[in-house]
Amino acid sequence: MRLKRTALFAATIALLTPALLSSALLTPAAAAADSTGNDHHGIHSRPVATTLTTGLSGASGSTIGPDGALYVTEATLGQVTRIDTRTGEKSVYASGLPPAVIDLGGALDVVFIGRTAYVLVTLVSSDVGGTNVSGIYRVDDRDSFTVIADIGAWAIAHPPATPFDVPSGLQFALDRYRGGFLVTDGHHNRVLSVSRSGVIRQVVQFGNTVPTGLDVRRKSVFLAEAGAVPHAPADGKVVVFGTHRPQPRVLASGYSLLVDVEFDSAGCLYALSQGDSPGQVPAGSPALADSGELLRVTPGGRLVPVVAGLDLPTSVDFSRRAAFVVTIGGEVLRITGLPKR
């Protein structure tokens, strides 16, 4: 199968291609802090990135669970791993999910509603050679799941307005929304609303913008866009829209391959760049190694680097005034000393 056109294939193939994983497992360069913050005494301090844990396989999406731990999907293993945010200790939370059947896909993201976890699984259906459902799985037990929404089948029955190669799409990220979920599809370039009873509807259809990570605050949806090949920095955007008659508005732009967006506990908005694009490259080419950045979105609409030198990051979450960044190479970095408001 030849995958082309959309930049999310570049970003996500980079997440899961075995050759990339091998190179990312080499000793990484230390992450460099690029901006300063003030502690409560008014003394300037730089953000510091340290390794919390390593050894994840096909790591992709993540979330802070109701117990305060970090939960990360491992797509190549078909599992969700719990990580203690203080000690880095790992334990298997759920296993037996459909693993990736091609170089990308499988379990890509996870969220909790109450104490129940829901996992987004993609590119495992028959149109890519799989035998499973591409959609949202409810975790019933450590090795027991219930499919609550077959997004792949819905996508095939409701093709997007933009060109596509994979009929079932590539669902990339999900977040809680009105008792259900919002889901991005980076191949079909749209955002879907999914209820826990399996009702699916399209919220907004984009052009070739490649929506990736998202965060929902009240009635507003904050969304990262990776941008189309060749991943020009100007096409990496953070946008915001409401779900009723959505009209996306650009909040900030200027960094290529944005793959996530998230608020911290203080209400500051951050974006995550996978890194600099090598230029006009074939779909499936990753960002340059050690060029990823954690960025803060300022009220004035700028993206300000907080930490640079990240090696192909995939997602970011915040807890206790620290950021937790998951990388392709199976690391989780803890970043402290973040800027104040």
Image (cartoon, helix red, strand yellow):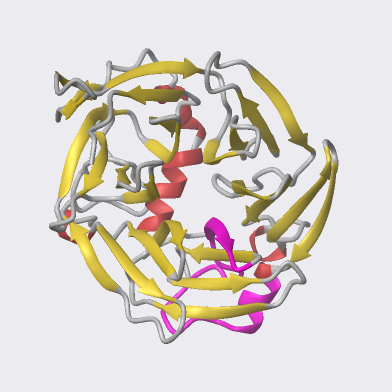
**Is 157 contained in the magenta span?**
yes
Rendering quarter of residue 161: bottom left
Q: Residue, x 15% and y 54% (percent of image)?
A: 254
Residue 197, image x, y percentages: 77, 71
Q: Residue, x 58% and y 29% (percent of image)?
A: 57
Rendering quarter of residue 124: bottom right
Residue 291, image x, y percentages: 23, 33
Q: Residue, x 41% and y 80% (percent of image)?
A: 162
Q: Nearer the viewer, residue 171 or 125?
A: 171
Residue 295, image x, y percentages: 24, 42
Instruction: Report the label total.
Output: 0
**Is 8 contained in the magenta span?**
no
Q: Quadrant of the N terminus?
A: bottom right
Indicate whether 170 appears above or below 323: below
Asked if residue 278 shows in the view, the reply is yes
Q: Nearer the viewer, residue 165 or 225?
A: 225
Residue 134, image x, y percentages: 68, 60
Q: Residue, x 33% and y 29% (percent of image)?
A: 311
- Range shown magenta: 153-178
Q: Quadrant of the C terminus?
A: top left
Please state if 208 lies on the left or on the right of 301 as rendered. Answer: right
Indicate whether 252 appears above or below 339: below
